[in-house]
Image: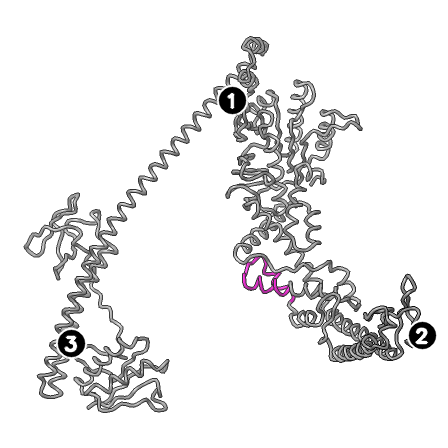
Amino acid sequence: METKTVFQTLEFDKILNRAKEYAVLEETKENIRSLQAETSLGAVSRLLSQTEAAMSLLVKAGSPPIDAFGEMRAIIKRLSIGGSLSQKELLSTASLLKSSRSLKEYFGDNKTEIFSDYEYRLTAQKRLEDEIFMKIISEDEVSDNASDELYKIRRQKISANNKIKETLQKFTNSQNYKKFLQNAAVTLRNDRYVLPVKQEYRNEIPGLVHDSSDSGATVFIEPMAIVTLNNELRDLESKEKEEIAKILIYLSGQLSGIWEEIEVAYGLILDLDFIFAKAKYSRHVKGEIPLLNDQGKINLKKARHPLLNPENAVPIDIEIGDGCDTLVITGPNTGGKTVSLKTLGLLTLMVQSGFAIPVFMGSEIAVYEQIFADIGDEQSIEQSLSTFSSHMTRIVSILKNATFGSLALFDELGAGTDPTEGAALAIEIIEYLRKRGMTVAATTHYPELKLYALSQSGVQNASLEFSVETLMPTYRLIMGMPGKSNAFAISKRLGLSDEVLEAAEKRLSADAIRFEDVLTVIDEQRIKAERDQQEAELLKEKIRVLEEELSSKKDDALAKNREIIEKARMQAMEIIEEAQEKAEGIIQKLNQEAKNQRDRAKAVGEARKQLAEERQKQAQKLANEEKKKQNPLTTKEIKIGMTVMMDDFDTPVTVDILPDDKGNLTVLAGIMRIKTNIANLSRCEAKKQKQQHSPYRNASARGKEIRPELDLRGMNLEEAEYVTEKFIDDAVLANIPSVVIIHGKGTGVLRAGIHQLLKKNKSVKSFRLGNFGEGEAGVTICEMK
């Protein structure tokens, strides 16, 4: 890759300066600032995979938990040789350990294959981390509870301080001594408590003189009464420092034992901070991960320069490849040629450094061995270099270092000298680089280069669109179209006389005029094609809207049909409820009229049988309606001779005449011909006996022997009461002396409700909970009368 001059030319250094602001650690920011682009397809693919995974995690789980601790290399080196750390260094190391543990948990909660190795290698030392934070409050303060000895010393210091203050207050509060003092303030000199005594009374208060004021009017005396106490306090402070040193040595020793884990964790955290900083900036520019290749193929869709305001920047499409290795870009001044060239180079550098780029999904970009750029006017007065000379100096350097699989970008190639000579040089420079397997993109004003791109295989024209009506560039890059000179049209619009314009046109060669005319025709055809395409798109949109409207009407019809079916369902439910009420009335009547237990049970059974049959009949009707709703017959399916089911018929019917456009058709039911509508028909499926779930364990068909065991688990109380009553009646009919009801232990609500029901049931003689081995409180044993 070229030197940092290319980074500055393409403004990649500005990208790095913006990206580093998303890093947490200062060392990471330095690493981003000195980042170098990768040149192999595999390395770039790995970087982009990391960035893509990090962008996904930022959306899913937020930023990774990294604390802003300081530079750690010197600290780790001291730990490796068993050195002692300061309070500040211990806190930095604890913050590193906390970040390592938190990151391990972060990746553990959000599993990704890309970061699985990081999760495995990060260390978690929560006990040691907590111990350091508990004992070291700040870089200037150690906790009283850091050790028992430190706690004891600090209590003694408080006591000594209090004694000193009490003794000094006797001097400041005494009427005898007040006149000797300048003021009642106790102060410190040489870390010892002293009194401010007037110079003329210095002999009135016996003690040690530590200092005097600048004027000499005040002397600071340590009274003899507190000399011993001050000495004791100094001794305690010395012991405190020694104990703090022991604590720091102890904690440093704990860290020294895992210095290698700390070193590995530090490297991993730097890597992760680096990766996520790039991912955060990639999200900031609304970047996408492009497809990669090492064949020089570029297909950037709606590419945008990341340093331009996205609200104002016009996205461009750039294509190189598929037999084309060179792009010649033409267009008016300030039309966006240089920005297009920089966009191509900058996005390539970003990708090869692991950044997502502001393009549409599905874009593709090549990975290059080197990137060269000659963009901008860098003429030097000191070196006596003209514009042409400064350009040519850089071009010579590019030609000397040209390598296969590299990218070269030229702005105004061959400019600054005679146009004929400049155009010839430009063409040969491009050819020289093409022969060495390089991809080339160049901007120019020379018509010779436009013709060269039109006639030379592997070279493609592109132009920046310009509106003659507004005299403003549109900044749209048109692929495959050479730029048209607009000098005469612009001049005329700005007011240049026709006389001057006509004279100027006569000076043009016939070839030049024909070429401009061809470009004019091509441009007009392009504009017309674009308008036609826009009209086609509008028509396509109208068709889509109409399809949505038709679909909406169809949905409304289906909704109305569902409403009709739901209404029919409600009517059916009313019929079922009515039948149930009738059956219950029959049961009540039989209860009153039955003369003995057996007659009553038989009557109840018959009534319940009638009820079940009525419910089954209505349920089957509802099921048929549901099948028709979910999978209705269509006219395409109907064939003559097809067997179908018709509403209100228990037996199948046969299609005799196919349905008309309204769905009306004729069916045969035996010898009868019946006219009906397809909406009244449903598919005739083979009858399948599907055994219904029964709460009775191993229950047989009605009328056969019933196992005396009922399982109510999973039912609510209302369902359980209904099933239990039926079960008791069936047990009576079957002459079963005792039954087992399984209700489970649970909250006890189901058991209590069933017991209340059994108390009221006249067919139950007695009941009890199960004993050990019978199910205990989870079952109830009933004795029948």
Q: Which residue lies under the disc numbered 1?
A: 468
Q: Is residue 107 magenta?
A: yes
- The crowding category of the residue bearing disc 1, from other C-alpha atoms within 10 Å (few below 14, some 14 to 19, many at least 20), is few
Q: Amino acid at mark 2?
A: Asn
Residue 321 in picture, x, y percent from top left: 56, 35
Q: Residue at x 20, y 84 (%)?
A: 731
Q: Which residue lies under the disc numbered 2?
A: 203
> Image quarter for residue 528?
top left
Quarter occupied by the N terminus = top right
- Residue range in magenta is 100-123
Vertical placement of residue 408 versus 226, above or below: above
Calculate the distance from the C-alpha at mark 3 to the C-alpha at mark 1.
92 Å
Q: Residue at x 90, y 67 (%)?
A: 211
Give the foreground label among 2 and 1.
Answer: 2
Calculate the distance from the C-alpha at mark 2 to the C-alpha at mark 3.
121 Å
Q: Which residue lies under the disc numbered 3?
A: 608
- The tag earlier along the polypeptide, 2 or 1, is 2
Q: In terms of depth relative to the viewer, which is nearer, 33 or 588?
A: 588
Quarter occupied by the C terminus = bottom left
- The tag earlier along the polypeptide, 3 or 1, is 1
Vertical placement of residue 533 versus 709, above or below: above
